[in-house]
DNA sequence: CACTTTATGCAAAACGTTTTGTATCTGTCA
DNA sequence: TGACAGATACAAAACGTTTTGCATAAAGTG
């Protein structure tokens, strides 16, 4: 068990003072030491496998090089992965590490977690919230740089990033319109959340832009469960003049639409085309035929959040941004021309 | 922007020395200070909202109170959530924070991440690997306490935790046998991984324990994709003497079996009962009817890993364990008595 | 009453860095 | 030659804790 090598060891081995080692190894102060010495020190440090203790350097210059990511239930959802991965990749590229805490919906716990994060002197915090409701920032968070991830808030002094929900609705409709559909229904989420409003708005806007509209009977809003979506789709697809295509709030609901279609003896996409939102591969790839869907940009949102956070850490005067990231369509096999 | 309050501020406000504050606030040294003084100091500290700087205390006592969790692709998979959640919950209960890094399959990156973790003086590392292959421990990891999560290795000096795959196979078979099935097929994963071998072994063992066996035609091994499983199931279910039940390697493959059944006009569970493994709610709850399945204990594994890790951090002599956590069945609606 | 124990509080050192200020040396210029 | 600038290296302080050892006062013991 070789005990960890520290800057003193390097100094001793290189025959110089710790100051010189520190200077030689630092970007900004390298000029204060002779070029030869720099090279020498660096090779000695490499040889010894020296890496500065970040606890110590963090303590000294009030920068821990750690970012906190606090989320509600996010980690337990399938999207979480991509978000975290994006955040982590960006952090890693920029020399930071991520501390992830997960408070469920327990506010007291959340407060404790945030305090713990601050005890560790995180340089900034990403506050991730499932469903981009307008959210209020916990008092504990004030004081450190902070970014809202998958959430918005009224306070214009905090930056946030959410998916472009309206754009997602447009993209979904466009996919179906481009395939030639004229009677397009929608199975929406009945919850009062921006995603539901936004996707509907985009959906309708795209329709009307093409001189189309959505017949009231072809629109149904249910809970976001597969089961309820199935029942909703059953109702719509049983109509005498049923839609030839269905745009679903999310892939799991599209799964319900598949089930409804199968139950009615309708085949996808021949008899009914279906488009979802999320691009949840388990579902979208698992369905038969594969589900064309609008991808939510979780990975990009994660990346954006840490990059923006770090920008505001470096420069507290950096302009605050309310970002909306667009949602690209992912084509699989659930959309075809209507009619035989 | 009130600057952070430190121990000196508390000492000044309480009219005592920093030593006394530290003692009063510490579990172990509280006895060195008068009970009244303790109360006084504590109330002052609370009033000021004092919380010790963990960078400093970590530096002082070589304990950062941070645990590292390095994984390959784990975060991007739907199981990851539960694992992380379990690890985090346990860590949080024990006063630790989790640093999560994700290296994909890039070894060089992984080395860098581990080094970064060590620079931050993490007290221990959980090394999580998808698929519990026997794994070799990166040289970088040596030196800090370490637990293998969802993986095993040859080295008996490192503790590890994996699901009880054999038990999962047994549980799956038992579920179907108990419902009265005698002709049970299996759609397995053809990959050479412990999960595939273990589940098959348990499946066969349970059958034979009940005087049953699996007809070779009723066993098929494919890639774990929904599509390939569907084709495998199509083959098995098209046999003149088809099985009345199918045990599938995982829920996504069970989804394929549902599709095959539907395609053949067989209804689940009336004509064919189906059991999966994973308890992936998107799939298991989403399928119609709901999929009975064997849950993988990801949450528990995550918990176990940090608890064991912390035990070994406290006491480096703690006995090493190779744990296998059992997989409970989750009943939904995809199993019924065979025959009409 | 002298002596030892016990209770209580404080000063100082240490953890491993980074940075500021100062000292030494070389060479240049008046 | 004396003064001065420029290079180069080092000592020391600081970041915020925790802990060891010591000092003082109070209390118990012979």
Image (cartoon, coloured by chain):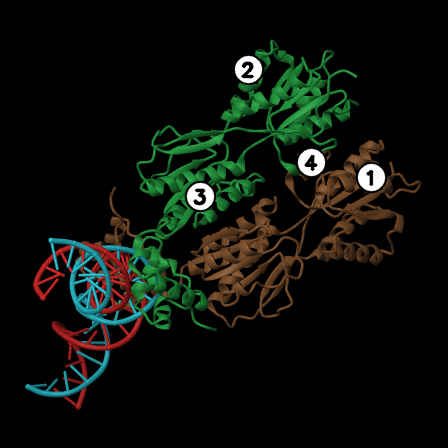
Chain colours: A brown, B green, C red, D cyan
Residue sitting farthest toward the top: B211
Distance between mark 3 and mark 4 Cα atoms: 30 Å
Say if A49 sits above or below A286 in the image.
Answer: below
Report the mark closest to the observer, 3 or 1: 3
User: On the rendered image, what quadrant is the C terminus of chain B found in?
Assistant: top right
Circles 1 and 4, Cβ within 8 Å, touching? The answer is no
Sequence-wise first label, 3 or 4: 3
Residue found at x 58% / y 67%:
A158
Nearer the observer: mark 3 or 2; the answer is 2
Secondary structure type for disc 2: helix
The residue sitting at the right extreme is A240
Chain letter for the residue marked with disc 4 in the picture: B
- Residue corresponding to mark 1: A272
The answer to which of B10 and B176 lies nearer the viewer is B10
Question: Same chain for marks 3 and 1?
Answer: no
The residue at the point 80 percent across, 32 percent down is A262
Report the side of B214 relative to A211 (left or right). Answer: left
Distance from label 1 to label 2 (Cα)? 45 Å
Nearer to me, D28 or A305: D28
Chain letter of mark 1 equals A
Q: Chain ID for label 3?
A: B
Residue named by callout 2: B205
Q: Are labels 1 and 4 on one chain?
A: no
Residue B70 bears which disc, if any?
3
Residue B285 badge: 4
Q: Secondary structure at mark 4?
A: loop
Residue A227 in the image: state x and y as whole percent.
Answer: 76, 39
């Amino acid at each position: 068990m070789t005990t960890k090598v520290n800057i003193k060891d390097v100094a001793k081995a290189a025959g110089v003072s710790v100051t010189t080692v520190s200077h030689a190894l630092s970007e900004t102060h390298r000029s204060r030491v002779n070029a030869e010495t720099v090279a020498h020190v660096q090779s000695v440090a490499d040889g010894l496998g020296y890496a500065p203790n970040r606890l110590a350097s963090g303590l000294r210059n009030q920068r821990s090089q750690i970012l906190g990511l606090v989320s509600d239930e996010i980690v337990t959802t399938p999207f979480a992965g991509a978000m975290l991965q994006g955040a982590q990749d960006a952090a890693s590229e920029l020399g930071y590490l991520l501390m992830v805490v997960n408070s469920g919906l327990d506010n007291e716990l959340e407060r404790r977690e945030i305090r713990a994060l601050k005890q560790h002197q995180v340089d900034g915090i990403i506050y991730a919230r499932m469903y981009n409701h307008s959210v209020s920032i916990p008092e504990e968070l004030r004081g450190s740089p902070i970014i809202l991830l998958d959430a918005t808030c009224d306070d214009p002094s905090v930056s946030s990033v959410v998916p472009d929900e309206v754009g997602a609705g447009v993209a979904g409709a466009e996919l179906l319109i481009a395939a030639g559909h004229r009677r397009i229904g929608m199975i929406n989420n009945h919850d009062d959340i921006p995603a539901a409003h936004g996707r509907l708005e985009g959906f309708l806007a795209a329709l009307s832009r093409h001189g189309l509209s959505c017949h009231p009977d072809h629109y149904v809003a249910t809970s976001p469960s597969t089961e309820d979506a199935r029942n909703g789709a059953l109702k719509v697809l049983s109509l005498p003049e049923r839609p030839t295509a269905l745009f679903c709030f999310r892939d799991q609901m599209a799964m319900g639409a598949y089930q409804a279609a199968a139950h009615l003896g309708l085949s996808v996409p021949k008899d009914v085309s279906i488009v979802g939102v999320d691009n949840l591969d388990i579902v979208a790839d698992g369905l038969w035929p594969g589900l064309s869907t609008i991808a939510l940009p979780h990975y990009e949102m994660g990346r954006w959040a840490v990059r923006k956070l770090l920008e505001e850490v470096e420069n507290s005067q950096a302009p605050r941004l309310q970002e909306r990231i667009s949602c690209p369509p992912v084509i699989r096999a659930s959309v075809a021309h209507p009619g035989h």
